[in-house]
Amino acid sequence: MIEMSTRDMLRAVADTQVAGSAWGPHPGKPLPLNEYATAVAAQAVQPAMSPIVLAGVVRLSEFALVAITGLAAYGIYLFGALGFSGLYLTAIFGIAAATVIALQAADAYNVNAFRAAASQLGRVAGAWVVVFGFATSVSFFFKLDQSFSRVWFAMFFVTGLVVLSVFRMILRSVVLRWTRAGRLERRAVIVGGGPAAERLIAALHAQKDGDVRIYGVFDDRADDRSPSEVAGLRKLGPVDHLVEFARRTRVDLVLVSLPVTAETRVLTMLRKLWVLPVDIRLSAHTAKLRFRPRAYSYIGNVPVLDIFDKPLADWDVVMKWVFDKVVGTLALIALSPVMLATAIAVKLDSKGPVLFRQKRFGFNNELIEVFKFRSMYTDMSDAGAAKLVTKDDPRVTRVGRFIRKTSLDELPQLFNVVFKGNLSLVGPRPHAVQAKAAEKLYDDVVDGYFARHRVKPGITGWAQVNGWRGETDTPEKIQRRVEHDLYYIENWSVMFDITILAMTPVSLLSKRENAY
């Protein structure tokens, strides 16, 4: 697999001379889309469901269902006579685990299997019979057949088969509904038109039960070299417009249909697209230059080279969501006395509301509204942060100076984490829309600034615990912030989040020189 890190991208951009803007369109300034792209982007789109997560949830559900069925049969028929039995519990949970293994071996944990009816029930029944046959053999060879009730064994077998079959039919109904809603498909666009794109589209459409649905083509070339329609798909505009398109609608996959040898053109495309939280793949199905087989990944049987991956996908998304909700809720409860005291102090210190709402850039450059304790006089508030707060700023109240210095003003953002879900506990700090460094907007100072929005922003982050918080009056300060944010995105893990949270109180106490 070939995958570019953020640093690789930055190095490639710096070392390659390409005519025109180094970074393509200004990501913060929307570009008008053509009528076809506008119509596609306006379609209602359901959130994506990861097939990997779905399969994992089904495995856990079936393990639980089998175990509950065995326990219910034991409770109904044997518990009154035998009470608690470690031997039966071992058998029940062993059969539950063996069932999941057998269904996995029968290839019953993929989306296509979930959609089937007769074949799915056949796989379930076959796996169930094999498991009970194996259990019977084990009890016979270890001379345990007299230790188990045959009535219980028969109840478990029959009831378990019915329960699994009913569950699979309910699952089929849900999966078919999700399929019709597009939740189990990867929404894709092609970058690069002409014959190469036509061959790629044909290869993908030929996939049986493929999960990729192509919505159009983006290409910078004129229509005589790249026609307005390729293999029945409309051209949605130049590559510059893809960034705006991906921010109006869900795009999961970008397939670049340019030859690997066209290094300059490929880099031109990538430098425009790497700020998006999508998988970017370089098509290799017609390339004459061949790599080792392990260098490729596959979409069905179409070989591709992995250029960029979504920073968070599949179980990573689930783990971060659970971490945010659980830890965020506990933090909200634990810090509620501090928040109450702060609210009272803000209210007594100056007239105006306790909370201050501010528009900031969130995930995928979307505008979100974050909560803070008000730290400025109401008539001097700066919702867009057009002017940075400086030392001894007259706009800041007495209480405001203290809560800004200690970051207590940020605590209401726990409401964003727990209830609104547009912030994480840990991530790149969301910046105000008009925030500036040296009188320039942040994205005018730092190349690729909006790449930090490929993940959800956070209350604290890797930059903050390393001292890059507070005033950003020079280009170097915002540059270092962005570097730390990109490092966090590339190296995310739950343990990394825990480490940053643990470092945050120490950082607040020891690195306060830039916080005003």
Image (spheres, rainbow, N blue to C red):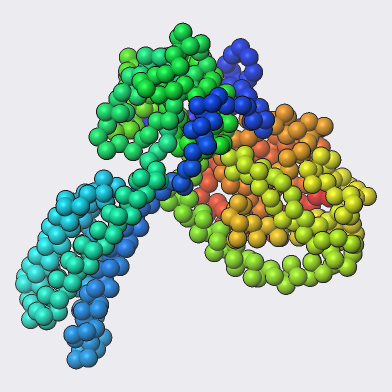
Please report the residue visible at 60 percent of the width from the left and 35 percent of the height from the top. 451
Considering every residue shown, the one lying at the far top of the view is 224
Answer with the quarter of the image where residue 327 lies.
bottom right
> Residue 27: where, in percent of width, then height?
64, 30
Residue 121 image point, x, y percent: 17, 56
View extreme (bottom): residue: 81
Instruction: Locate residue 454: give its quadrant.
Output: top right
Please give the name of the residue rendered at 59% of the width and 18% of the height, measured from the top-left corner: 15
User: In the image, what residue occupies the spot 26% across and 62% down?
Assistant: 167
* Above-or-below relation of 511 to 443: below
Work out whether 397 lies above or below 444: below
Left or right for 419, reference 186: right
From the viewer's perspective, is residue 320 above or below residue 89?
A: above
Q: Nearer the viewer, residue 480 or 83?
A: 83
Residue 432 at what x, y percent from top left?
A: 73, 43
Q: Quadrant of the N terminus?
A: top left
Report whether 514 appears left or right of 487: right
Answer yes or no: is residue 309 visible.
no
The residue depicted at 61 percent of the width and 56 percent of the height is: 420
Of residues 261 and 285, the one nearer the viewer is 285
Residue 172 appears at what percent x and percent y?
Answer: 28, 54
In the displayed structure, 412 sits above or below 385; it is below
